[in-house]
Amino acid sequence: MDTMADRVRRVRETIAEAALESGRRPEEICLVAASKTMGAEAVREAILAGVDAVGENRCQELTEKLAQGAYTGAPLHFIGHLQQNKLKYLVGKADLIQSVENEELLRQIDRRAGALGIRQAVLLQVNIGREEQKGGADPDRLPELCALAGSLPHVRLEGLMAVPPVFAGQENYPYFEEMYQLFIDIRAKKYDNVSMNILSMGMSGDYPAAIRAGANMVRVGTAIFGARTYPQTV
Ligand SMILES: *Cc1c(COP(=O)(O)O)cnc(C)c1O
């Protein structure tokens, strides 16, 4: 049976190949372990095996595992659907909130971060496939969201995140390319107080393609932890 260390090493090797193919160094790609449903022990093993950060999807799970000391030694990211009434559990706890999708969330994060006297790092999630039930901002709304984020004193916008429509591997490539183009365009506009440095896209099924298209952060769950089992709901 392979170990956590084996799996993380294989993911790193795949990342390195894709990075080199796209003219970048392997160290430029940040590996976020997407740890939803995984216990604190598995998260600690992944951190020991050398992932760069851990990403959680649910507030309650994050809060529980945080209390168990699961994230010691690695930055904690929030990558799940953001609800306003859950922000109090995230602002100041997560080092990076990747899934901000509208103006109201930006303002609420700013307010809460201000109360804590911090500046909260965030990414804007983009609904690049323009899918109806999918989270994320419409690509057309990015200019105003970037301008707003730059005007909020307790928010630091660091880049973009996307979860494109789910296809096997290469078929996502056009979406990844479109995301990279948006990222480059926004960066060129140089919004005040916005640092467009992070492009977070790619999961277990498609992270090599995402990196080849320009991602510098990938969120990998299954390839690190194995398949997820969700509790049965009746
Ligand atoms: C679960 C999840 C991932 C990782 O998915 P895998 O296919 O298991 O690698 C990445 N990003 C988000 C937002 C997720 O919810």
Image (cartoon, grey):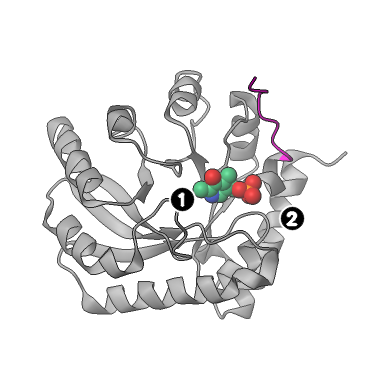
Q: Which residues are magenta?
A: 226-234
Q: CA distance from mark 1 to mark 2?
A: 33 Å
Left or right? Give the position of 181 relative to 211. left
> Which amino acid, by three-letter code, is at mark 1?
Gln
Q: Describe the element under mark 1 as helix, strand or loop.
A: loop
**Residue at image mark 2:** 10
Q: Quadrant of the C terminus?
A: top right
Q: Provide residue 10's location: percent of width, then percent of height.
A: 74, 55
Answer whether residue 125 is visible to the viewer in this image.
yes
Nearer the viewer's eye, disc 1 or disc 2? 1
Q: Is residue 81 magenta?
A: no
From the viewer's side, name the closer residue of 38 and 16.
Answer: 38
Crowd tier of the residue under label 1, counting other residues whose Cα lies within 10 Å: few below 14, some 14–19, many 20 or above: few
Q: Is residue 230 magenta?
A: yes
- Residue 80: percent from left, percent from top: 45, 41
Q: Residue at x 45, y 44 (%)?
A: 79
Question: Badge 2: few (under 14), some or many (20 or more) residues near its Cα, within 10 Å?
Answer: some
Identify the residue under disc 1.
133
In this view, 82 is above or below 152:
above
- Magenta stretch, overall SS: loop
| Residue at image point 33% right, 29% down | 86
Amino acid of disc 2: Arg
